[in-house]
Amino acid sequence: MYALEDLWQGKITPSERGYRRGSQYEELMREAIETCDIFYKELSSVGKKAYDAHCTVENKLNDLAEFDSFSRGFRLGMRLLLDAINDDGLPMIQRHEMNTAE
């Protein structure tokens, strides 16, 4: 199976990630949820609506930032791959080496 086919068929979903139990991420997520729950209970109904709207916008911003990071990393990986396989018909020499095959 090819990775491109897996991606097309939805078997690879880069935006969906899990986390390890007992990891720092899990601990910080737990703390964030606990403090958010405490904070949210203290808000008025108007405050809750404003906070929900704020969280929606913040989540959209985070999604855009994560996509940008993913895209940048993917493009960098592809550039590295192309540098490694692009031989321009020449022997595999380094960019600044002399081509002794000429």
Image (tube, helix red, strand yellow):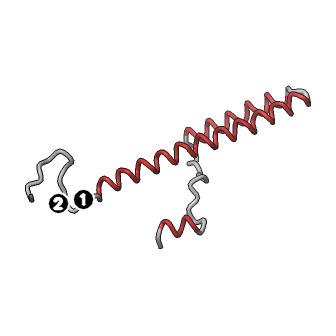
Residue at image x 77%, y 33%?
A: 54
Which residue in the rendered view is the most extreme toward the front? 102
Between 37 and 87, the one nearer to me in the picture: 87
Residue visible at 60% across and 52% down in the picture: 15
Marks 1 and 2 in Cβ contact (< 8 Å): yes
**Left/right of residue 39 with respect to residue 29 in the rendered view:** right
The residue type indicated by label 2 comes to Pro
Q: Which residue is mark 2?
A: 91
Residue 78, x across and y down, in percent: 40, 53
Characterize the local packing of mark 2: few (<14), some (14-19) or many (20 or more) Cα atoms within 10 angstroms. few
Q: Residue furthest bottom?
A: 1
**In the displayed structure image, the side of residue 37 where residue 9 appears, left or right:** left
Q: Position of residue 18 (x, y in %)?
A: 59, 51
User: Does 25 sit above or below residue 17?
Assistant: above
Residue type of the residue flagged with mark 1: Asp
> Looking at the picture, how far across and down is residue 24, in whole percent?
55, 38
Residue ID at (35%, 51%): 80
Quarter residue 46 falls in:
top right
Front residue of 87/37: it is: 87
Where is mark 1, residue-wise? 87
77 sits to left or right of 84: right
Secondary structure beneath dot 2 equals loop
- The crowd level at tag 1 (other Cα within 10 Å; few <14, some 14-19, many 20+) is few
Quarter of the figure with residue 90: bottom left
Q: Is residue 84 above or below residue 22?
A: below
